[in-house]
Amino acid sequence: MGRSLLLLLMAIALPAVAQIYKYTDASGNTAYSNQPPDGTVAQPVELPPLNRVGQQQPAAAAAPTPATAAPSTQASTDNGAVYSTLELTDIPTQEALRANNGTFTVGVKMEPRLQRQHLLRLILDGVPYGQPSNVPRLQLVNIDRGEHTLGVQVLAGEQVVQQSPLVPVSVQRVHKP
């Protein structure tokens, strides 16, 4: 019985959620207060629930590679997970990529594996390219010769969850006059 009495006293002593009141002051301005002013009509304000931010786990530190040297944009997913590795593979870094018809594929390396609710989408020269896919091999078709940048985004619906660094690539293809 002593323990239940203690719990009851603690429940009574806990502060209640503060109520906010809206009213018009003597100068005609709208004002807000946690106590209704004397002699003034005040309306209680319905507040939305408070936002809560969970603690994020730091991503594992890895030595930067040429494809990951630039910072990536990392946002947490619904369960707080972040892809610790997200980069394009199968792109030559020291020479031009030879694609006679401008068609080639790139791979996506990611840790952990792609979550079921996420899709991958290429970024070509800063613009989304192609349809989102859940396959870590993405194809580019009829890309003009010359210098480009490539990256990959992880999407949850239309929202970008994370984006890899943009990687420069030089496409070399046969020129037909």
Image (spheres, rainbow, N blue to C red):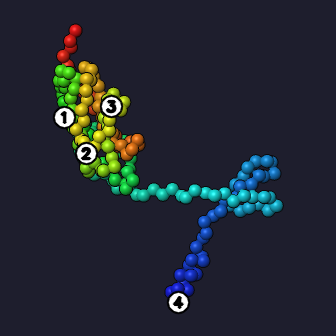
Q: Nearer the viewer, mark 4 or mark 1?
A: 1
- 10 Å neighbourhood of mark 4: few (<14), some, or many (≥20)? few
Q: Classify mark 3: helix, strand or loop.
A: strand
Q: Nearer the viewer, mark 3 or mark 1?
A: 3
x and y percentages locating residue 69 in the rendered image: 28, 38
Q: Classify mark 4: helix, strand or loop.
A: helix
x and y percentages locating residue 106 in the rendered image: 22, 34
Q: CA distance from mark 4 to mark 2?
A: 57 Å
Residue under the image location 19 percent in, 24 percent down:
99
The C terminus lies in quadrant: top left
On screen, residue 19 above or below 98:
below
N-term mark: 4 or 2 = 4
N-term mark: 3 or 1 = 1
Examine the image and state in which quarter residue 100 appears.
top left
Q: Which residue occupies the foreground of this view, 65 or 157?
A: 157
Mark 1 — residue?
A: 90
- 10 Å neighbourhood of mark 1: few (<14), some, or many (≥20)? few
Disc marking residue 110: 2
Residues at marks 3 and 4 touching, judged by CB atoms closer than 8 Å:
no
Residues at marks 2 and 3 touching, judged by CB atoms closer than 8 Å:
no
Q: CA distance from mark 2 to mark 3?
A: 19 Å
Residues at marks 3 and 1 touching, judged by CB atoms closer than 8 Å:
no
N-term mark: 1 or 2 = 1
Disc marking residue 129: 3
Residue under the image location 74 percent in, 61 percent down:
36
